[in-house]
Image (tube, grey):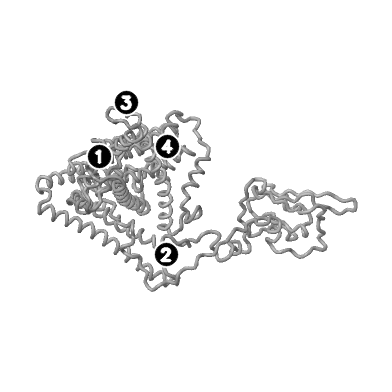
Amino acid sequence: MVPAVPPPVRPNPVRAYFGNIRRAVSSTFEGMTVTMSWLFRRPSTIQYPDRTEKPVREMLPETYRGLLEVDLSRCTACLLCAKTCPLGCISIETCKHPDGAREFQTFDIDNGLCMFCGLCAEACNFDALAHTREFEASVSSAEQLTVRFVDRPGRLVAKAKDLPPRRPRGSILAALIPGFGRRRRRAAPPEPPASPAPAPAAGAEGPENPEGTA
Amino acid sequence: MNIIQHVANLLIRSVFHADPASWPWTWLVQAVVIGIAAFLAFAFVAIFAGPVSWIERRIAGRIQSRIGPNRVGPQGVLQWLADGVKCWLKEDLVPAAADRPLFLAAPYLVFTGMFGAFVVLPFGAQVVAADLNVGILYLLAITSLVVVGLLMAGWGSNSKWALFGGVRSAAQLVSYEVPSAFSLLCVVLLAGTLSTQGIVAAQGGWPWDWFIFRNPFMFAAFFLYFTAAIAEGNRTPFDLPEAESEIVAGYNIEYSGMRFLFFLFAEWANIWIMAAISAFAFLGGWQIPGIAPEQIAATKGWEFVGWQALSWTIFLVKATFLVFVVIQIRWTLPRLRVDQLMITCWKYLVPLSMLMVLGVLVLLALVPEGGGADTILRGAMVGLGLAVVLVSALRVRRTFRVDREHYREMEGRDLWYPPYRLP
């Protein structure tokens, strides 16, 4: 048995027509008043990066995977990181001295290639290679994206037996590239104390008039 | 006599010491003056379209609870210059499969259609490039040139999205020509002339002399025209030709660099044009309260210049106010669907605007101008207009106050933040 379906209620077309007009006018009016009031509300956002309370990198979590840095005084040049990297953005070259000691020729990290997966930092056994919380990495040319960590010739490869303590994260990158990611900061202008009721003056709302519809 | 002939005759008399009527080079001087006038209008468009783009982005920002451009120059006022320079430096790319001549010519056609409207816009008492006796018809005709440009851009790009955008915009512009022409017909009926200056002269400086407050049908016709004009300018909520979420960017998707900028430029200038047409056709144009146009025309020297400047300013204020309304509508209403767009036009705007024409005709026959019934009608309409403004201001205030208390409870700060302050 087919269940009895009640006949659909058809609205009166004339009422629907004029109801549509009324709804269009009233909803436009309501919408215009709401958006108008938003012009006088405090925005949710602030100007990045110079009006933040502290630099944004300091607000990031400790485990944030920002730009890579390597502490060469702890690096044994085991090449684990370079081999782990799926993109090959780490290039390490060493040469051997006659007395058996090894010297760094290059230790370059191409930030243009890096996808910040963190595999290299995980592979590093001596906490030499690690992510910093630095992320503001824009430079003016593609070559500058490659960070060269061998700062002086004759930098010897570390022995795993006696490693110096890890330098603070970010300090190496900061010393290597002065001004890198350190943007100018402006103090916010002092906000006048909130007076009891500085309501939006009804007369001073120039482009108001939310009647632009028919 | 319009200002161009006036200036040309003045030049011929004072510089060349000749009689303008019989001097053989009069046409040359007039041509030069017309060229200068066109340049001034062009400069006006350029200088107006740029800052309006900045104002719109700032307003959009605040409505969306963010800041908007604020870095280039104080408060970011020079953002439009930075954008212009950026677009200028971009490569002007032409797709390999594009219909090259159509593709290259389209932006200029759109721009010409827009710029041609400036010829008859009455900026001031005597400030109009050419006071054509078919002014309104000319306006409707020349702005339709934009359709051709958009179709050319859509077809020439050889991209399906661009073609959709072009065809959509053609359908939309052709449809909305009808209600906007009918609404302007109401104005023409009242003014008894097609000339733009004649329409302004038929109104007065005080609000009760404006056509919008002449009778209820004119009041409705203003909003009908305004809606149709927004649709003709491809503005939200009728911006289907460039609906990003459906057809990426519509007819201008394949354009880059300066050609792309020309489209945007035409769009910004189009806002100004529709605001200006609404202002001169319904809101009294440049009319100064208490001063008749004949008195202005009779003055001489610096007094004349002063009155012209004042009338120009009044017109500018009215049009700029409407520009603000257009911008706010854009950030208030969502976009219509294609079928809704056509329904809005053919089922609502067209019959209603026809009704307004009939109503205006009936009232023209029944209510003699200057009589008691006319005065009552005008007074009632001005009262209605004031009531709308007042009620909306109170609604804004109420909406704000309710949320302000909630905000103070949640954030411990005051919600009030003036639009010029940067957080």
Q: CA distance from mark 2 to mark 1?
A: 43 Å
Query: In the structure shown, which secondary structural element does the residue marked by tag 3 occupy?
Result: loop
Mark 3 Cα-neighbour bin, 10 Å: few <14, some 14–19, many ≥20: few
Q: Is residue A67 visible?
A: yes
Question: Circle 1 sits on which residue?
Answer: B178
Badge 1: residue crowd in 10 Å (few <14, some 14–19, many ≥20): some
Mark 3 or 4: the one toward you: 3
**Quarter of the image where one finds residue B166:** top left
Q: Amino acid at mark 3?
A: Pro
Look at 27% across and 29% down and name the residue there. B21
Gap in angstroms between the C-alphas marked 1 and 3: 45 Å
Query: Quarter holding the N terminus of chain B?
Result: top left
Against B12, is B410 above or below? below
Q: Earlier in the sequence, mark 1 or mark 4?
A: 4
Give the x, y percent position of residue B410.
Answer: 43, 71
What's the chain of the residue with tag 1? B
The numbered dot on residue B24 is: 3
Q: CA distance from mark 4 to mark 2?
A: 41 Å
The residue that label 4 is drawn on is B162
What residue is at 64 percent from the left and 46 percent from the top? A141
Q: Chain of mark 4?
A: B
